[in-house]
């Protein structure tokens, strides 16, 4: 079937696959380095407890067969190894079926991780990676021509991602309709980056232009993905430019980079790459598999499309345990003020206001007023992100913040590795507390006078002091 192959997109496929493999590598590395404190056997939300209280069909994966911290580490590091092999192009050196199995491996491994990740893996880019990774299995590699159906499915995913994000904004916070959301967003976003202070202090007309450009890119441009070339390439390039602007303005894990990866698959690189190499016709079994997968994705798209059309649109939701076809969206509402949970400890025997309280430092989230927000993305600091949600509402932290404090009181090494600064290197504190502060970016004059990127004021108590048990309590 000549219609099945899209020879001219061989380089688009190659670029997409290599970029996706890099995102996979970052995701598995993030899992390998953080899981013990978060979902390990002695973590804040232990995965074994989740597996005991949920049925198999609710969270299928490898850990249904066995869970231990060693096994999780083996899964995560194996994912890193397979991702590195895909970055190096091993899939192109294998027969078609072998390349497909190689691409299926990181998808199955990461799906298993997400299934036990609980709130730590409740972000939209987890499902986005799994959906893109599932489609990548059927793209082929090497000298097999790219299937046009899977390329169209990638455009369909990119359309839902961008259009869903645009709709949730105009349906949600009125500031998006007034073009004023970016007066606040650069300051109040979950994880500011090193340029966020400068973006926040751009003139207000620039903020209006940012918001308007966002609406155009997310509400109008996605429809152009389904037009002939070169219009589709131009639409994808506009999305790439918008995503790179977001990369400069903040840290959003691999969301922006994965969106760029999807957009790169749309661009026709033929004018730069020249004629395609000699490609072989796909075998009949492969055509049948791709057609079946296409029909499956189209059938599964019913509920995400219904959600897009609904006035009660939800964002970042999966409709099946395999995360095959999902709905996406971001920042349907914008915080006007930035609240931060500050965690402190003291070695004093009595926890009172005059005690010597010392502040724990986090790797990414604001804390030290003199520290310029760091560049973190595409790496994902899961604890830091959840601390931002906790500041919005204690309900987001109800299940894990108590265990987090307990581990600080024990001086748990895995938990301390998630932090940027431990003020108690010799022995854990006797008491730990948490307080909420209002953070705001300083102005240029304040920065010059104080050297501080942030100013903060106390708002309220988040967690009353909790204590490490004394010797008699431990013996009991």
Image (cartoon, rainbow, N blue to C red):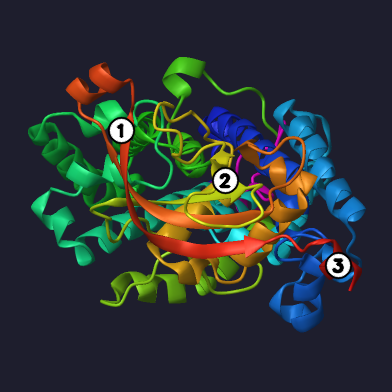
The one of 52 and 15 positioned closer to us in this rendering: 52
Residue 96 lies in the magenta-colored region: no
Drawn side of residue 120 relative to residue 395, left or right: right
Q: Residues within 10 Å of mark 3 (few under 14, many from 20)?
A: few
Q: Looking at the image, which is closer to me, 5 or 206?
A: 206
Q: Secondary structure at mark 1?
A: helix
**Quadrant of res 472:** bottom right
For the residues marked 3 and 2, what is the alpha-carbon distance in whole angstroms? Answer: 79 Å
Element under label 2? helix
At 59% from the left and 32% from the top, the residue drawn is 19
Closer to us: 217 or 422: 422
- Quarter residue 250 falls in: top left
Residue bearing the label numbered 3: 472
* Distance Cα–Cα, label 2 vs label 1: 26 Å
Contact between marks 3 and 2 (CB within 8 A): the answer is no
Q: Residue at x 12, y 56 (%)?
A: 177
Sequence-first disc among 2 and 1: 2
Which residues are drawn in magenta?
134-148
Q: Which mark is residue 234?
A: 1
Lower sequence index among marks 3 and 2 = 2
| Image position, residue 363 (x, y; %) | 57, 36
What predominant SS class does the magenta segment belong to?
loop
Gap between marks 3 and 1 measured at Cα: 70 Å
Q: Quadrant of residue 51?
A: bottom right
Residue drawn at x 26%, y 30% is 199
Residue 391 on image: x %, y %: 42, 58
Task: State yes or no: discs 2 and 1 in contact (Cβ < 8 Å).
Answer: no
Question: Relative to residue 450, is residue 3 depicted above or below?
Answer: below
The residue where tag 2 is placed is 2
Q: What label does residue 85 carry, if any?
A: none
Q: Position of residue 59 (x, y in %)?
A: 72, 73
């Amino acid at each position: 079937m000549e219609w099945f192959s899209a020879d001219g997109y061989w380089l688009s496929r190659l670029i997409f696959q290599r970029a996706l493999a890099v995102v996979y590598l970052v995701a598995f590395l993030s899992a390998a380095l953080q899981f013990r404190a978060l979902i390990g056997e002695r973590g804040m939300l232990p995965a074994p407890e989740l597996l005991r209280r949920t049925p198999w069909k609710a969270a299928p994966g490898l850990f249904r067969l066995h869970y231990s911290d060693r096994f999780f580490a083996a899964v995560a590091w194996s994912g890193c190894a397979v991702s590195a092999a895909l970055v190096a192009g091993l899939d192109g050196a294998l027969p078609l079926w072998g390349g497909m199995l190689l691409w299926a491996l990181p998808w199955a491994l990461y799906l298993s991780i997400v299934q036990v990740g609980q709130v730590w893996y409740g972000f939209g880019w987890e499902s986005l990676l799994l959906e893109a990774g599932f489609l990548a299995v059927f793209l082929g590699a090497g000298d097999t021509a790219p299937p046009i159906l899977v390329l169209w499915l990638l455009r369909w995913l990119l359309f839902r991602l961008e259009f869903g994000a645009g709709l949730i904004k105009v349906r949600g916070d009125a500031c998006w309709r007034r073009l004023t959301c970016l007066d606040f967003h650069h300051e109040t976003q979950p994880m500011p980056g090193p340029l966020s202070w400068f973006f926040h202090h751009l003139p207000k007309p620039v903020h209006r232009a940012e918001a308007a450009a966002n609406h155009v890119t997310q509400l109008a441009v996605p429809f152009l993905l389904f037009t002939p070339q070169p219009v589709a390439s131009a639409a994808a390039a506009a999305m790439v430019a918008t995503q790179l602007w977001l990369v400069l303005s903040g840290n959003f894990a691999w969301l922006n980079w994965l969106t760029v990866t999807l957009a790169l698959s749309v661009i026709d690189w033929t004018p730069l790459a020249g004629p395609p190499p000699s490609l072989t016709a796909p075998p009949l079994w492969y055509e049948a598999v791709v057609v079946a997968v296409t029909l499956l994705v189209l059938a599964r798209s019913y509920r995400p499309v219904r959600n897009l059309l609904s006035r009660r649109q939800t964002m970042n939701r999966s409709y099946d345990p395999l995360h095959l076809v999902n709905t996406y969206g971001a920042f349907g509402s914008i915080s006007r003020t930035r609240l931060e949970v500050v965690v402190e400890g003291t070695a004093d025997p009595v926890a009172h206001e005059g005690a010597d309280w010392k502040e724990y430092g986090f790797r990414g989230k604001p804390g030290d007023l003199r520290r310029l927000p760091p560049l973190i993305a595409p790496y994902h600091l899961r604890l830091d992100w959840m601390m931002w949600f906790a500041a919005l509402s204690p309900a987001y932290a109800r299940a894990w913040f108590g265990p987090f404090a307990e581990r600080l009181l024990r001086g748990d090494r895995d938990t301390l590795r998630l932090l940027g600064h431990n003020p108690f290197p010799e022995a854990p504190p006797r008491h730990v507390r948490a307080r909420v502060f209002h953070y705001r970016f300083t102005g240029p004059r304040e920065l010059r006078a104080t050297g501080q990127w942030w100013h903060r004021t106390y708002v309220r108590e988040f967690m009353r002091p909790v204590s490490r048990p004394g010797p008699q309590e431990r013996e009991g």
